[in-house]
Image: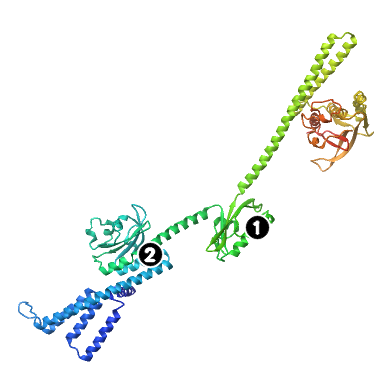
Amino acid sequence: MSSQFIAWFRLRFRHPDWLPTFRLVVLGLTGGFAVWGLWQGWGVLTWLALLLWTAWVLLPLSLALLVSGLVVLGLSWGLGWWQGLGGEVLLSRQGQELLLAGLAVVGASSLLRRFLQVVEWRLAAQAVLTTLAELGSEAAPDTALHQALTMLRDFARADGAIALRQLDEVTAEALVCLPATVLPCQLTTPALFAEALARNQCLYYRDYASMPNASRLLLAQGTQSLAVLPLASDGLRGAILLLWHRRTGVSSTLRGFIESLLSELRSLLRLYDTGLQLGQTQTRFSAILETMPQGVVFVDESGEPGWLNQAAAMLLNLSPGAVEPPVLAGAMATLRRQADNDQELAAQAEQFFAQPQGEIRNWDWIFSQPQARVLRIAITPTQLRGVPGRLWMLDDITEQYFGRQALLEHTQKLSQANQELEKLNQLKDDFLSTVSHELRAPMTNMKVAIQMLKLAPTPERQERYLEILQAECKREVELINDLLDLQRLEIGNHAALVLELINLQEWLPELLGGFQSRLQEGQQVLRLDLPAELPQLLANRAGLERVLTELLNNACKYTPVAGEIQLSVQVASVLAEDSEEPVSMMLFKVRNAAEIPIAELPFIFDKFYRAAANDTRGKGGTGLGLALVQKLLEELQGRIWVESGSGWTTFTVELPTWWKPE
């Protein structure tokens, strides 16, 4: 309690009404006159005059009147002014002279005090303006406005002060309240200062309650007198309210003091409003940076700590916020070294950072450990007060990157599939063309043979036409059977295979006997390499016969005149796919003196494919033979492959010597 009283006393004692600048001067003069009076032996009245002069110069009016009353009372008692009966008061001539002298002293003292008081208020205004200017440049905006409002309240000896800012037509915000309870709510109405803004002058209300537009809110807080200081500049509208809980008249000196501060108060309010807007903007940007999924890192060459947001901190294993540059650079280097394309990134970094002000975009860092991740880096150069820096953006594009990769792979596969489909369509068209030709050719030949048979003049000619008709019918039937067999093999709709032991030494010569006339026709040589000690083969005789017949027919078809055809059989041990032990396999090799172009080898077993360019004898075909062979061998648990080069072509058929039930 004592400390609060001391603070109150010091504040009041420094108030301009107490003439803090001239107080010592006046007291010094009083002391000098007192010494002179002692030297001269002044009388009582002279000392009382000196006391009145000092009181009316130094003290406020109320205290000066109190001192004057005490002096007058003392004089009246000492000089015997009270006379008469029944309370009648009479003044003697000497008393009248003393009264006139006292009034002269009081008048002169009042004029001197008035002059000194004006000077004191001007000095106080200059001091406050200097303080406000220092606060505006050094202190935070809210601190500066709070201290300015405190000084203004103290100098005006007000009970409360409020700094207001208008938000819109119906709402105003209390920026600073002294004391904090002077307004029950931070939001109020701009009607409190609308008239002062409209008139652009300070308004003073000694009896505020008698005003017709008095605010009930302020009256409820005990406001009896009010001063409204309008603060408006460049679209900003606000005011300062000074409130007294007692009826108080604002002197002309106080008004001059207040109005001399308006310009600086407007600047403080503008500074405070700018600070609020910057704070709101900073808060919004901070919220955006902290919640955005991309990592953000800022570092410059000033040596000051860099900064990174939450997303970047998680990527770099650091704490968000300010980070020392060496720590930040080390974390970035560690992250880069973990990338799968580290060597490529190091080379690109040398190229990128050779240009200090160059921008970097779409710099992808690819990681496979500890999990698959792709970071896309973007770097933007900055300049802040002449200090260069860089703003890094780390964007996790893992889903987009691998999605794009998958899309590219899928597109490539679709392109390949489309090409294969186009090739199959072309093969199908070729097949349909071939089949239609092959089917039409025998029918045409049969039709001609029938017509010629009707016109044949001799039995020999009739016999010849009958042979042609029979051969063409056989050819038509074989073509249709090939188509049906291939269809059945593809859909698996065929009878169960009948297995039997085949003695190859007896069976193969019989099979080759059927090719003698064709070999003689082409002047070709067929050599059979058949070891004497071959095991019997457990297989389907009809299927194997069809396979070898197709291969030998193709060999006869594509081997030139006087060329050689070879058929060899051997037993070999190979490793099975599902076992580490070797398995005995029977290999049939059909070689002929002809060569298939390397470009055609991958397609030789495709359906509808015909190597018409190698058909040196013009025998033609449907392109189904080798496709049928491959399907048949799959049913026989075997396989076939082809090799061609150095003027020779070899088809190898591999079959197990013993059947393996599926």
Q: Position of residue 651 (x, y in %)?
A: 85, 34
Give left or right: position of 214 versus 468.
left
Asked whether disc 1 touches disc 2, contact meaning CB atoms under 8 Å apart, the reply is no
Q: Position of residue 492 (x, y in %)?
A: 75, 28
Which kind of residue does numbered mark 2 sit on?
Leu
Lower position in the chain sequence, tag 1 or tag 2 = 2
The answer to which image quadrant residue 481 occupies is top right
- Kindly tell me whether residue 373 is visible in this rendering: yes
Q: Position of residue 636 (x, y in %)?
A: 81, 31
The answer to which image quadrant residue 200 occupies is bottom left
Q: As rendered, which of 516 and 94 lies closer to the eye? A: 94
Q: As rendered, which of 302 and 309 lies closer to the eye? A: 302
Which kind of residue does numbered mark 1 sit on?
Ala
Give left or right: position of 393 versus 582.
left
Give left or right: position of 475 versus 14.
right
Q: At numbered mark 1, what does the secondary structure look like: helix, strand or loop?
A: helix
Circle nearer the viewer, 1 or 2: 1
Q: Is residue 274 above or below residue 9?
A: above
- In the picture of the structure, the residue carrying the numbered disc 1 is 349
Residue at (19, 75) in percent of width and height:
65
Residue at (33, 58) in percent of width and height:
184
The answer to which image quadrant residue 230 occupies is bottom left
Crowding near the residue tagged with mark 1, few <14, some 14–19, many ≥20 C-alpha atoms within 10 Å:
few
Crowding near the residue tagged with mark 2, few <14, some 14–19, many ≥20 C-alpha atoms within 10 Å:
many
Give left or right: position of 20 versus 293.
left
Q: At numbered mark 2, what does the secondary structure look like: helix, strand or loop?
A: helix
Marker disc for residue 145: 2
